[in-house]
């Protein structure tokens, strides 16, 4: 309708979960990298949560696009299914005949099929959207499916995505068995005010627009206030605002247009903005908050030296069942050395810096990636040879999706490598 007026190749704010429009910030990138890593490493059961409209579906579609040919994705959107219907759906997508078969025969047939796929170098990934709609019976069935495994890993990789209600379901005593099997947890949060502008620019660029700003600064502020940073609401506001601007033969969108559109949509502005910055507080409160931040920063720095986790604020967590870098694990890159290593091995301090740099580039899954890659090289921290450092850096770099961050990480770590040689 308005595409030609503004010079778009297509609508930039459509409702379809088109992975080309996937917006990458630190939170989304960390969640994407964690799930991709979990699937390719055969971790089993993974959880992705977020409020309505935060982008879970488009992230799942982006995952499917990035899979190599060895991964067979099965996307399940309609989750009002019994477990029998769920198994039948998976079998038909593989594809296998399910005509006239009962629940138990289908389950055994699925197990044999998944094992056959694994033995032929293929990975089957089940991506379940709107997981909050699953019944307790279906959740129990997912637990059974997550138990299927071989020596080399889980037979079926399951990404369970859903709204806050899914978290509440998993916290019930009746579903604790499933929660304990979650290997990777990710959460998508609403966008910040600065990210809203970048998000809008990104979608306009994908739609083929490279002209001057269409949305004024005040319009962006209004969009953030009415949407609370929720991508779906941002899309709705922007799409309707562009229609209004087109009908008025205008090339820009003002805050007044956003206000009118929001009123028509029945949206209320955010009355109180909670920001990471300290604003409008008295000096005593501001000093107390700043002191709290500094103490938190110091604590996190200490934990990087002493703990088994690299903490981050990008919405990705590791569960207790994930193989993580632990002070109790001999192979842990974060574990202090018990003795001075030989001259041809890497000092433990190097791995502190490696873990910190990788966490900055890809998020808290860095610790898991380092541990897995050290194991893949048939080495351990206690005696990791210097001659394999370049190979290790190259192997962990693969998991950094942002090319600029990857180049910075490699440059930094190669400098570190030269210093210890």
Image (cartoon, rainbow, N blue to C red):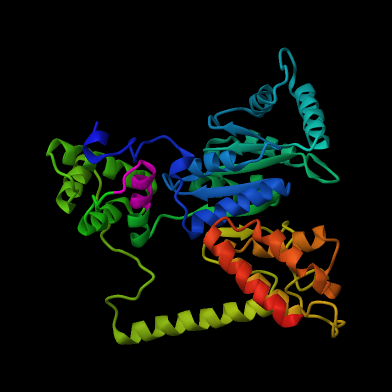
- From where the camera sits, is residue 233 visible? no
Q: Position of residue 101 (x, y in %)?
A: 75, 16
Residue occupying image coordinates x 57% and y 39%: 65
Q: In the image as oriented, which residue stretches furthest toward the top?
A: 100
Residue occupying image coordinates x 73% and y 20%: 96
Q: Position of residue 67 (x, y in %)?
A: 63, 41
Please say whether residue 208 is one of the residues in the magenta stretch.
yes
Q: Is residue 230 above or below residue 95?
A: below
Across the whole image, how many numbered discs are drawn on residues? 0
Left/right placement of residue 253 relative to residue 124 reads left
Residue occupying image coordinates x 54% and y 41%: 60
Q: Specify start and end residues of the magenta stretch as a single range.
A: 199-210
Q: Quadrant of residue 12?
A: top left
Q: Is residue 242 above or below residue 370?
A: above
- Nearer to us in this view, 6 or 19: 6
Q: Position of residue 270 (x, y in %)?
A: 27, 57
């Amino acid at each position: 309708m308005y595409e030609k007026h503004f010079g778009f190749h297509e609508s930039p704010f459509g409702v379809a979960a088109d992975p080309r429009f996937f917006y990458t910030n630190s939170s989304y990138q960390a969640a994407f990298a964690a799930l991709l890593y979990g699937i390719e490493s055969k971790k089993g059961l993974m959880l992705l949560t977020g409020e309505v409209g935060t982008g879970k579906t488009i992230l799942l579609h982006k995952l499917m696009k990035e899979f190599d040919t060895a991964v067979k994705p099965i996307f399940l959107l309609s989750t009002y299914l019994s477990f029998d219907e769920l198994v039948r759906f998976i079998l038909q997508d593989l594809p296998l005949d399910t005509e006239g078969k009962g629940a138990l025969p289908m389950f055994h047939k699925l197990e044999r099929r998944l094992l056959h796929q694994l033995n032929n170098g293929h990975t089957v990934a089940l991506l379940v959207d709107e997981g909050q709609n699953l019944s307790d019976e279906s959740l129990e069935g997912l637990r059974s499916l997550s138990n299927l495994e071989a020596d080399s890993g889980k037979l079926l990789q399951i990404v369970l995505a859903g709204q806050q209600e899914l978290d509440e379901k998993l916290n019930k005593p009746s579903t604790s068995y499933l929660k304990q099997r979650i290997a990777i947890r990710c959460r998508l949060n609403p966008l910040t005010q600065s990210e809203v502008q970048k998000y809008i620019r990104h979608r306009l660029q994908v739609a083929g627009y490279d002209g001057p700003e269409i949305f004024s600064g005040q319009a962006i502020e209004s969009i953030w206030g009415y949407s609370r940073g929720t991508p779906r609401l941002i899309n709705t506001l922007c799409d309707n605002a562009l229609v209004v601007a087109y009908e008025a033969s205008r090339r820009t969108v003002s805050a007044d247009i956003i206000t009118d559109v929001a009123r028509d949509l029945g949206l209320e502005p955010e009355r109180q903005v909670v920001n990471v910055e300290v604003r409008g507080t008295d000096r005593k409160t501001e000093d107390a908050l700043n002191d709290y931040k500094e103490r938190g920063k110091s604590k996190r720095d200490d934990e990087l030296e002493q703990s088994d986790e690299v903490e981050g604020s990008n919405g990705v967590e590791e569960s207790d069942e994930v193989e993580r870098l632990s002070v109790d694990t001999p192979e842990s890159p974060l574990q202090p050395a018990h003795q001075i290593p030989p001259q041809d091995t890497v000092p433990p301090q190097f791995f502190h810096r490696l873990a910190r740099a990788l966490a900055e580039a890809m998020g808290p899954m860095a610790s898991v990636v380092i541990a897995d890659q050290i194991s893949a090289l048939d080495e351990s921290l206690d005696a990791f040879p210097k001659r394999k450092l370049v190979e290790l850096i190259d192997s962990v770099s693969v998991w950094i999706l942002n090319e600029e961050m990857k180049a910075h990480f490699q440059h930094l770590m190669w400098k570190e490598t030269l210093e210890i040689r």
